[in-house]
Image: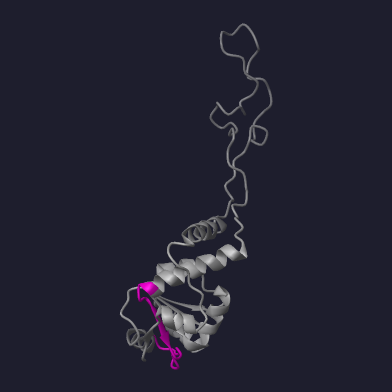
Amino acid sequence: MSAKTLTAADAASANITLVEGRKGTQAVHDLIIAYRANRRSGTANTKTRAEVKCTGKKMYKQKGTGNARHGDRGAPIFVGGGVAFGPKPRSYAKKVTKSVRKLALRRVLTSKIAAGEVLTVPAFEVADAKTKSFIAAVASITDAKKVLIIAPSFTEQTYLAARNIKIVQLITSAEANIEQILHANAVVITEDAIEAIAKRTA
């Protein structure tokens, strides 16, 4: 399968918007932080002294024992007591504006294209759903260790052929994000997916 390296001139002719200099690096950072924060479950939970299963009876009388005065064993200073200022279920989700998302995608594509790591192919499909055929198809395009293949859609046979290959990821042009693009050593884009990528950078 023949592959062509996508250049900045090719990207311009395909209406893929790129950026100059280091513009957009902060947008990439913000978006990656948001991706990782949004994956956090936020389910950590501790019990306060009001929630632990413990008697509310006063431990011992207030005066005359020589000990410090205490109320009940549910206090945070005792083993089995509540936790002071412990975590409670919460959302770590962060919102990123559309303009920042577009700028981050432009920045990442600009860097990958400048490094010669973006390739284009007419189409990508494995008809027999065999892993061996999938490996051969990818090897005919690139020998990179981590490959991301972007297309408008993939056939069921292609997905089946790729399911055991962890170093190659199939993603549609509508779902591809900058984290996946940055992770890959080679980004393979089918010709019919270039238009969708161009719209996302417009």
- Residue furthest to the left in view is 143
The spot of residue 48 in percent (x, y) is 63, 35
Instruction: Name which residue lies at 44% across and 91% down.
Output: 122
Establish if 85 lies above or below 103.
above
Query: Relative to 35, is 128 on the left or the right?
Result: left
Q: How is the image coloured?
A: one colour
Image quadrant in which the N terminus is located: bottom left
Q: Provide the major secondary structure of the magenta segment.
A: loop
Instruction: Name which residue lies at 59% across and 8% down.
Output: 65
Q: What number of labels is visible? A: 0
The spot of residue 55 in percent (x, y) is 67, 28
- Residue furthest to the bottom in view is 127
Query: Residue 167, can we see it?
Result: no
Image quadrant in which the C terminus is located: bottom right
Q: Is residue 126 magenta?
A: yes
Q: Which residues are magenta?
A: 114-131
Establish if 12 lies above or below 56.
below
Which one is nearer the viewer's eye here, 111 or 150? 111
The spot of residue 149 in percent (x, y) is 44, 80
Instruction: Name which residue lies at 58% across and 78% down.
Output: 199
Which one is nearer the viewer's eye here, 182 or 27? 27
The spot of residue 120 in percent (x, y) is 42, 85
Name the image quarter holding residue 38. Answer: bottom right
Query: Residue 121, can we see it?
Result: yes
Which one is nearer the viewer's eye here, 31 or 143? 31
Q: Is residue 110 magenta?
A: no
Instruction: Name which residue lies at 62% across and 44% down.
Output: 88
Establish if 108 lies above or below 83.
below
